[in-house]
Image: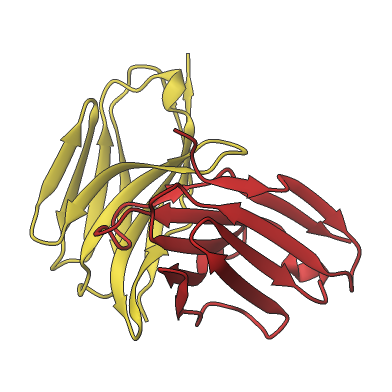
Chain colours: A yellow, B red
Amino acid sequence: KQEVTQIPAALSVPEGENLVLNCSFTDSAIYNLQWFRQDPGKGLTSLLLIQSSQREQTSGRLNASLDKSSGRSTLYIAASQPGDSATYLCAVAHPQQAGTALIFGKGTTLSVSS
Amino acid sequence: DAGVIQSPRHEVTEMGQEVTLRCKPISGHDYLFWYRQTMMRGLELLIYFNNNVPIDDSGMPEDRFSAKMPNASFSTLKIQPSEPRDSAVYFCASSPPGQGTDTQYFGPGTRLTVL
């Protein structure tokens, strides 16, 4: 059974710091991996999608890497800002008996102080 | 362009009552997903539909839970009877044709509290 783990569960940093969020998964048979952002009381917003054949994706100050063989992904946030404060979730698209499904980690809650 | 619409946003009910959560996906999307989020278990897929047909309901926890999609613009998730352990945030998401599970647009969620 595919399991997704995110470490740390919570992280507090001062504004301007570069930081890395970690995601690991137990089964390397994935189609892709996504990083989402969730603000309090809101739904999820997709930040980056990495296909299984890709190694990384970049969007602005965000860079996500994927090492499928080791079952790991990282989300790098450069020059963090208070507006980056949110919960970040990692999800893998994993083949299921009846199709594919997104399996989510529990998230890392990031707090950036000014 | 309206996003995924969920109603109600908050629901408080008593144990044993029937609860119905509603979702309107983005127009033109052909996949619809129902998720449940709790502190203990995180975000879990309950069921998903493709072209109004349930594809995978293996995540539905018990027979007390049922979901329907009578047409392309509406879906319901019903809990009958509700129990305190059903308290969670329930999200609906939809995906455009050809995207499958790759690109999901999430609604704001319904926060359910069962007393």
Q: Residue A102's spot in the image, x, y percent?
A: 37, 64
What residue is drawn where x is 22% and y is 60%?
A: A32
On screen, residue A17 above or below A99: above
- Residue in front for this viewpoint, B54 or A57: B54
> Looking at the image, can residue B43 be seen?
no
Marks counted in the figure total: 0
What residue is drawn where x is 28% and y is 27%?
A: A18
Task: Please give left or right for residue A107 compared with residue A91 in the image.
Answer: right
Quarter occupied by residue A16: top left
Task: Please give left or right for residue B19 compared with residue A110 in the image.
Answer: right
> Looking at the image, can residue B46 be seen?
yes
- Residue in front for this viewpoint, B70 or A33: B70
- Residue in front for this viewpoint, B66 or B74: B74
On screen, residue A54 above or below B1: below
Quarter occupied by residue B98: bottom left
Residue at the top extreme, as displayed: A114
On screen, residue B78 above or below B28: below
In which quadrant of the rendered image does the N terminus of chain A lie?
A: bottom left
Q: Residue B1's spot in the image, x, y percent?
A: 44, 33
What residue is drawn where x is 38% and y is 45%?
A: A36
Task: Please give left or right for residue B20 compared with residue B104 in the image.
Answer: right
Q: Residue A109's spot in the image, x, y percent?
A: 49, 41
Residue at the front extreme, as displayed: B71
Q: Residue A15's spot in the image, x, y percent?
A: 40, 17
